[in-house]
Amino acid sequence: MQGEKLLDLLVMIVIAAVGLITAYICFGVLESQAEGRYHEYSVGGAIAGALVSWSFLGGFYRQMRRSSGEYERVVKRNEELQQKLMRGAPKPQGFEIEIDERKNIVLARPEEWEPKGGNIFDLELSKHHMRKDDIFPAQFVSWYVPITKVNSDQEAFFKNQVEAAKAMVGAEAVTHEIVQVGGEQSKVKSLKLIAHFYGEIMVDVPSLTGRTEVVWRVVTEDEYNKGVARVAASPSLEVAESDKDGNPPASEPVEEALPLLPDPPSPAPENDVKYQKVVQMRVITFHEELSTIYYFDFFDNEEDFIESSIKFNLLLDSVRFLT
């Protein structure tokens, strides 16, 4: 608050000086003329020019102050609401309050329980924006693990990640490079991996959600070639499309009483299985300041990868870390 008052005082001095200089140049050097009324007084010449300059510059500064303070007010209001919500949540002794703003949930966590990592985002291209003959939607998953004594050496960790990717069953043409993530002001050294896989793709409709989902697994080159030959010899059935709200078609009723746990995926009929080459782009950000390793995974079938990876790169460019 004291800093804001000092800033206002300095700006007022500058405005006064600029107003006088403007009046001197316009009405002293250039010999301009002006008349006006200020309340009940009639003024003219340099005085009128100074008043006009002061009024304009003062109004401009006030407008800037209002605009620049809007963001701070919103942040302050958000913090106030968070504090109010936290105060209303029960906090047993030995617990810490945790807030997830995206999912709008607050809970108390035992102090001895530590986050072990997990998903941050899990996204995929909407089926209504896919080509009619496309069976594999572009997928993006972001997750994290904490930095521990085991993985604290960044260079060694990156090297192990590259070797592990090349050793994966079904992986081919694995490439890697070092990139920067987090913007110019907070960029962090990261490892980018691109790998091509042989994929077995099938459709599943979990009873918990009733929504059609595409699931896939990595297979060996031999399994892939045999699967392609088998599918070619036995034309696959068309998968019924969900309606625009994501609900299953009428021929696939959803159970009214959902189970507490999702059922395991049931094996798809042999003629409902597809085989495609899948490309994965993984970016691993080793953020020492936040003691966290962030993973950004992007998948798509080989045919669509070049085009859809443009959006992934734009998404990656938007990443910022709150330090």
Image (cartoon, rainbow, N blue to C red):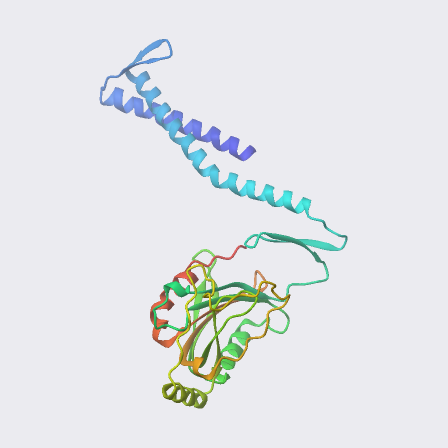
Q: Taking the image as drawn, is residue 286 in sight?
A: no
Is 323 on the left or on the right of 125, as rendered? Answer: right
Quadrant that contains the C terminus: bottom right
Q: From the viewer's perspective, is residue 236 above or below residue 316?
A: below
Where is residue 234 shown, x and y percent of the image? 39, 86
Q: Which of the pair 74/60 is nearer the observer?
A: 74
Q: Which of the pair 320/12 is nearer the observer?
A: 320
Where is residue 144 shown, x and y percent of the image? 56, 66
- Count up the numbered dots: 0
**Residue ID at (45%, 68%):** 139
Quadrant in the picture for residue 68: top left
Q: From the viewer's perspective, is residue 105 above or below residue 1?
A: below
Give the residue at the far front of this rendering. 251
Quadrant that contains the N terminus: top right
Is 49 on the left or on the right of 296, as rendered? Answer: left
Is 24 on the left or on the right of 116, as rendered? Answer: left
Where is residue 28 shown, x and y percent of the image? 26, 20
Q: Which of the pair 45/189 is nearer the observer?
A: 189
